[in-house]
Image (cartoon, rainbow, N blue to C red):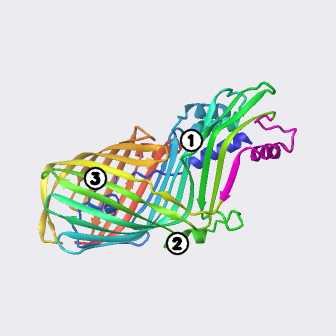
Amino acid sequence: MRKYFLIFLLFVTYKVTAQNKQILYGFDKIPQGLLVNPGAETDYKYHIGVPVLSGISANVGVSGLTIADLFRNDNIDFNQKLNRVLNDLGDNDYVHINSQIEVINGGYQINKKDYLSVGYYTEMDAFIGIPKDFLFLVRDGNAGFINKSFLFSKLAAKIDVLGVIHAGITRKFNEKFIAGARLKLYSGSLNITSTGNQGSFTTRLGASNIYEHSLNNLDVTANSSGIYNSEGDVDIDAGDVISNTFLGGNLGLGFDIGFTYKVDDQTQIAASLLDVGFISYSEKTKNGFIKGNYLFSGIEFQYDATNPNYWQDLNDDFDANVIRKDNTDSYTVLRPIKFNAAIKHGFGKSRREENCSDMSFNDYYDNAIGLQLYSIIQPIGPRFAATGFYERKISGNWNTKVTYTVDDFSYSNFGIGISANVWKLNVYGMIDNVLKLSDIADANSASFQLGINVIFK
């Protein structure tokens, strides 16, 4: 059973996503680019996203292992593969989940300086730390880890299902500087949070028995919303989860800010700070707390098949010594703050196209290269990624972008994006980690984004 539990846990943590949208950032004036930088450049009078199809993104990312590491048909014993995977895991390996679906999106040029954009999208976002030491403990028991401390700070998870209503303004202050801000109203539908845990579990050789077990400075908290009903039973209704993403009972506020600055005709820099905000959860909440110190001997912390009451005996002894409480209080969760910064330099043949929205002209180059940096605040601290990119403008209506990204998941992640303007339609598609598409089970990360907008210039 312990083996199957580990298989299940590793499989579930692989089927998740990451959040960096490095191909979209700063690419070809796509309207969805305003969601990753509200200070991005626009050159159209207004846009309308095709409902539900204007912005769909899904990513997969897990550090430390792949599905192929465990399940490739290579005539190697599964237990040997499992041992290798667990040994290769790092102390800070993790999974980050994020997917978004734009339900509605639109924008309008108020005047020659200001562009208003509004919309509503649903999002699933999660962080799950992979507790390497505890996986060994579950698989092997504690007899082989005498004097080793298992840290509860390694147990960290944060999962959100929410909807976001947003409105942003982008202002062109002059020919060189554009800045923008976006206000967000969050509607949390489902949440599980367990972060900032403290304490350790240690097994030592005992005097009165074989082992002595100690829980030191234990302080573990778990909060949830949308999971349990008033009787304390699990009650997750898919219809309620979806409907509560639009002005449900768990509300919060946040904002994005960003800018683009043209150093000269060929070079520009851009930066943005996203999801600075919070959600207050008060609907269908259930919270649990465990706190205290516990020293015990006489019960081996390892399953004993000859004692059918083993777990109950252990539970009763634990309750007598450690405080365990639960309540239904409201709680507040911060959104994961994200930071982007990029520099881009155009070169090659210079061209000019008319901007019909104000009858001016935009200069552009056939080619551009640049560098983007990305960071996100997670329960284990900030995580980083760096992306080098090359853009090629095939014509005034077709643009391509190739990226190379280094992050916690891979050192060989190449991506490609294509944006096309056909009549009034803007169609874009992006895919990441293209070298692994032929064997996706051997990839630590993969992603795609696509969308269709109607743009009037």
Q: 208 or 419: nearer the eye?
A: 208
- Name the foreground residue: 145 vs 208: 208
Provide the residue designation for mark 2.
248
Indicate the position of residue 312 as horizontal and vertical percent values: 81, 47
Q: Which residue is mark 3?
A: 271
Q: Residues within 10 Å of mark 3 (few under 14, many from 20)?
A: many
First in residue order: circle 2 vs circle 3:
2
| Position of residue 5 measured from the top left corner of the image (x, y, whole percent) | 69, 44
State the image coordinates of residue 112 (x, y, percent, origin top left).
Answer: 17, 71
Residue 55 appears in which quarter of the rendering? bottom left
Give neighbour class at mark 1: few <14, some 14-19, many 20+ (Cα, 10 Å): many
Residue corresponding to mark 1: 153
Q: Nearer the viewer, residue 16 or 421?
A: 16
User: Pointer 2 and pointer 3: residues touching (CB < 8 Å)?
Assistant: no
Percent of width and height locating residue 416: 35, 50
Q: CA distance from mark 3 to mark 1?
A: 33 Å
Asked which quadrant contains residue 192, the reply is: bottom right
Question: Is 127 left or right of 147, judged from the image as shown?
Answer: left
Name the residue type under label 1: Ser
> Within the magenta stretch, is there residue 308?
yes
Q: At label 3, which amino acid type do we have?
A: Ala
Mark closest to the chain's N terminus, 1 or 2: 1
Residue lying at 57% horizontally and 37% vertically, measured from the top left? 69
**Image-based side of 422 in relation to 413, left or right:** left
Taking the spot 69% from the left edge, 51% from the top edge, the residue there is 324
Where's the C terminus, which quadrant?
bottom left
What residue span does the magenta drawing correspond to? 299-326
Q: Gap between marks 2 and 3, in whole Å?
A: 32 Å
- Residue 424: in sight, yes or no? no
Q: Is residue 31 left or right of residue 223?
A: left
Q: Is residue 4 magenta?
A: no
Q: Using the image as rendered, state which of residue 7 and residue 391 is in the foreground.
A: 7
